[in-house]
Image (cartoon, coloured by chain):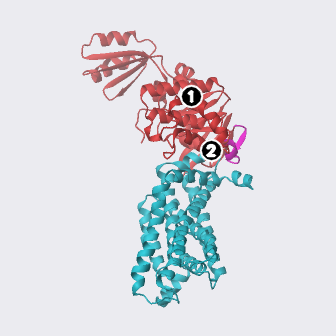
Chain colours: A cyan, B red
């Protein structure tokens, strides 16, 4: 098994990124963890004070499951957009790796796995806060851990498509403004989707973040999600479809 | 070590490489010369399997490319035109991380690090950040990094572009030591003195074709007149039309200078000596003269 991991070429890329991250761990962790933590506390208690219970739980409890997915999504997207693009374009790291016996697919898969794993840290931070605040209890909420990885890989896959298409960093502003932010409001992160008009609810059905939130919100509270198979399937389709498309786009871009 | 047969590559109808063939035996230093856009870099990329050719056959280190390009690259070192060292790592870490891409363990690379650093003249810089290195040091580290897998062939795309003369001489010295260790070198360059100094054979490319292929000495002997007189000064145009054109075997005017190519320069020198408004420089023909003759004086952008 250890040999299999060692000879799996994308792991060389994961390892490289991990070593860089380890050097910059403190500032990186602070940003990764403090930001969602502040949001959760600020909105959960601040806004929550004016809110009736939602779906039978206090607002902060409701919000925590959404916040968890939101921060995993953000973390995976930033890593697979800005950081990966730096390595592709600015630092020419990918070019250097391609001169070794590595392929474009090895690199893209490595970046995908790395962004997915790294994004779990943000989710774990939220889960920790949930335990501290007593929102999560016992061992059952730990079932959300593999969901974090799935959500991270899903959004890393989509982001890598943007990265392999991008001409400059400016491109990512469009992605965040036109895709990520609207998705956040359509997917039930901050409020239940049934308060949205019918067309927005229908649109939300097709968005990966909706399915991430459904899974994570239930599991983090120790409950069984209502439609877990569909949720997992949608996240897999976006994630695997995204990374497969990113591989093809990267091959075209780098084989000029 | 490298055999290229009838290699062709176009981009959207623009021909980059128009059917070139050459072979580089083991232990040779082969130089690929040509103006910008001649197809040198495309040729190198095809040889490494990074770009798929439209047609033609390539065999690198005994393996067919692009079919077995990844395996072939395991036996090859590459020094790219633009440095792509990892700025987040130290000098030693750069070597270790790069070795991993070849499937080498950190321990295996660590064992080679002292020799690689010594080769690059960076023995006391192992813990230094990349940003703290000079341009010449970065180049030497990039060359050392290309040796991390103990390659049979090293490809270099303009290895000394942007370096000062001291740094260039040090690089040349390192490349010569690679050759005496029996490695094969394949390089592109814009510097004719570099090619003349290092390369056993050079191929001159222009507009995707290989228009000359021989040793630098043989190219100079067969392709150009042995003597050159460069004449410049206020009256050069009038002198060139009246006298220069008659006395030289071949003459070219570039800007304010007349280049007179000839077998015997005595008459030309005598003529300019009588003209106080002219200055003349007499020298033997070199590879640059061959290059200019074959590819023209036009600027290629």
Q: Is residue B253 left or right of residue A101?
A: left
Horizontal and vertical percent position of residue B209 = 56, 38
Q: Is residue B23 above or below residue B231?
A: below
Residue B218 vs residue B73, the one in the foreground: B73
Residue B290 is situated, as x and y percent measured from the top left of the image, at 49, 25
Does residue B33 appear in this view?
Answer: no
A70 sits left or right of B2 in the view: left
Q: Quadrant of the N terminus of chain A?
A: bottom right
10 Å crowding of disc 1: few (<14), some (14-19), many (20+): few
Q: Is residue A239 in view from this perspective?
A: yes
Give the alpha-carbon distance from disc 2 to disc 1, as whole Å: 22 Å
Q: Quadrant of residue B218?
A: top right
Specify start and end residues of the magenta stretch as a single range.
B61-72
Which residue occupies 62% across, 83% down? A223
Identify which residue is drawn at 33% across, 16% down: B280
Q: Which mark is residue A100?
A: 2
Q: Label 2, secondary structure: give it.
A: loop
| Relative image position of residue A189 (x, y in whole percent) | 49, 79
B63 in magenta: yes
Secondary structure found at label 1: helix
- The residue where tag 1 is placed is B118
């Amino acid at each position: 098994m250890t040999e299999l991991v060692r000879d799996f070429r994308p792991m060389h890329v994961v390892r490289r990124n991990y070593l860089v991250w380890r050097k910059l761990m403190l500032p990186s962790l602070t940003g990764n963890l403090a930001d969602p933590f502040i949001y959760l506390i600020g909105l959960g208690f601040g806004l929550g004070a004016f809110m009736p219970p939602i779906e039978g739980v206090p607002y902060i409890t409701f919000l925590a499951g959404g916040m968890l997915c939101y921060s995993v999504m953000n973390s995976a997207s930033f890593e697979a957009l800005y950081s990966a693009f730096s390595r592709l374009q600015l630092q020419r790291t990918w070019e250097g790796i391609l001169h070794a016996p590595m392929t474009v697919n090895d690199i893209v898969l490595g970046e995908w796995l790395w962004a997915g794993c790294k994004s779990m840290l943000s989710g774990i931070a939220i889960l920790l806060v949930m335990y501290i605040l007593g929102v999560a209890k016992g061992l059952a909420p730990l079932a959300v851990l593999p969901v974090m990885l799935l959500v991270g890989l899903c959004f890393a896959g989509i982001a890598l498509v943007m990265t392999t298409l991008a001409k400059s960093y400016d491109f990512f502003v469009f992605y965040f403004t036109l895709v990520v932010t609207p998705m956040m409001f359509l997917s039930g992160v901050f409020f239940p989707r049934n308060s949205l008009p019918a067309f927005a609810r229908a649109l939300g059905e097709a968005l990966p973040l909706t399915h991430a939130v459904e899974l994570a919100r239930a599991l983090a509270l120790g409950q069984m999600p209502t439609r877990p198979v569909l949720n997992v399937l949608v996240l897999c389709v976006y994630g695997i479809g995204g990374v497969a498309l990113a591989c093809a786009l990267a091959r075209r871009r780098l084989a000029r | 070590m490298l055999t290229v047969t009838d290699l062709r590559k176009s981009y959207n109808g623009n021909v980059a490489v128009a059917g070139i063939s050459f072979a580089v035996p083991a232990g040779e230093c082969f130089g690929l010369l040509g103006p910008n856009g001649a197809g040198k870099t495309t040729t190198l990329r095809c040889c490494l399997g990074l770009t798929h050719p439209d047609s033609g056959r390539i065999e690198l280190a005994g393996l067919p490319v692009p079919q077995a390009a990844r395996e072939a690259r395991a036996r090859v070192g590459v020094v790219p035109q633009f440095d792509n060292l990892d700025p987040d790592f130290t000098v030693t870490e750069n070597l270790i991380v790069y070795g991993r891409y070849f499937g080498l363990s950190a321990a295996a690379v660590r064992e080679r690090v002292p020799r690689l650093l010594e080769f690059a003249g960076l023995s006391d810089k192992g813990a230094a950040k990349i940003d703290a290195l000079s341009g010449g040091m970065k180049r030497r580290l990039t060359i050392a990094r290309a040796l991390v897998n103990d390659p049979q062939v090293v490809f270099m795309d303009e290895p000394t572009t942007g370096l000062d003369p001291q740094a260039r001489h040090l690089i040349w010295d390192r490349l010569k030591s690679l050759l005496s260790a029996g490695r094969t070198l394949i390089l592109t360059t814009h510097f004719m003195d570099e090619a003349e100094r290092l390369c056993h054979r050079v191929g001159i490319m222009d507009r995707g074709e290989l228009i000359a292929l021989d040793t630098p000495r043989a190219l100079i002997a067969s392709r150009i007149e042995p003597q050159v007189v460069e004449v410049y000064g206020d009256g050069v145009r009038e002198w060139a039309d009246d006298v220069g054109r008659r006395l030289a075997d071949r003459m070219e005017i570039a800007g304010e200078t007349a280049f007179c190519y000839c077998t015997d320069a005595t008459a030309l020198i005598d003529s300019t000596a009588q003209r106080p408004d002219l200055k003349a420089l007499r020298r033997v023909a070199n590879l640059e003269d061959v290059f200019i003759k074959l590819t023209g004086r036009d600027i290629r952008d």
